[in-house]
Image (spheres, helix red, strand yellow):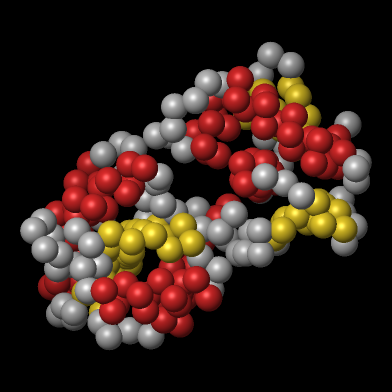
Amino acid sequence: MAASVLIVEDEAAIREMVAMGLGRAGFEARHAETAEDAEAAIKEGVPDLILLDWMLPGRSGVDLARKLRKDPLFKDVPIIMLTARGEEEDRIRGLDVGADDYITKPFSPRELVARIRAVLRRTNPAAGDEPVRVDGLELDPVSHRVSAHDRTLNLGPTEFRLLHFLMTHPERVFTRGQLLDNVWGTNVYVEERTVDVHVRRLRKGLSDSGHDRLVQTVRGTGYRFSNKL
């Protein structure tokens, strides 16, 4: 599934330019014009990264970053500050409140995309762009495709995220609660048996190629991804 980026910027022209560049690079872009709009958007669905303008109408981006870093639900969401402020003191202030990076306007879309990818690799290695391959099964996080021996497999978005997480953490056993936190998110409240439903769907999607055997049940604990019997 494409990484989602929340663009918090009150200037429409900049929002549109950034969204277009991110879309071309394979990201899912969402928009917010104020800190209040951004908070509402984050609560609806936590993005993989936030592009946060320093100067916003009403509450500033710095204040929002500081608030997010104090919230246990959102404190780990990566933040890149967008601003016209280029002085060293301002950069330090932005980083001190919890920003992961800082980019000064004007900037090129290519530079911004490179910064986003670098921050995502640094903060969440499993969210990188590199395809994952195990025993002829390949998952490409950029194109959102799964294939087995060069034949495309059809998986739903949740099954894709579940497979991506398991493939990037092989041989580790995860409880249903851990899978809910890492695949669905800590702010989504669903029953643990939901995991079982999606594991069954994932196995069904992998069954034609025989790769369903890689998603193993560990009785009394949870699930693991392994090519060992």
Q: Residue furthest left?
A: 58
Q: Quadrant of the C terminus?
A: top right
Disc count in the image?
Answer: 0
Left or right of residue 84, residue 106 in this image: right
Choose between 167 and 50: the one closer to the eye: 50
Residue 92 visible? The answer is no
In the rendered image, residue 187, in percent from the top left (x then y), is placed at: 39, 34
In the rendered image, residue 91, in percent from the top left (x then y), is placed at: 20, 71
Seen in the picture, residue 174 relative to 7 is either above or below; the reply is: above
Left or right of residue 42, residue 85 in this image: left
Seen in the picture, residue 125 relative to 195 is either above or below; the reply is: below
Residue 45: which quarter of the image? Answer: top left
Q: Quadrant of the N terminus?
A: bottom right
Residue 142: which quarter of the image? Answer: bottom right
Residue 119: which quarter of the image? Answer: bottom left
In the rendered image, residue 183, in percent from the top left (x then y), is placed at: 55, 39
Seen in the picture, residue 105 relative to 141 is either above or below; the reply is: below
In the rendered image, residue 23, in percent from the top left (x then y), is placed at: 50, 71
Residue 181 visible? The answer is yes
Q: Residue at x 35, y 75 (%)?
A: 16
Q: Residue at x 67, y 24 (%)?
A: 196
Left or right of residue 183, residue 8 in this image: left
Q: Residue at x 87, y 39 (%)?
A: 207
Q: Residue at x 45, y 82 (%)?
A: 110
Left or right of residue 90, residue 114 in this image: right
Seen in the picture, residue 115 relative to 73 is either above or below; the reply is: below
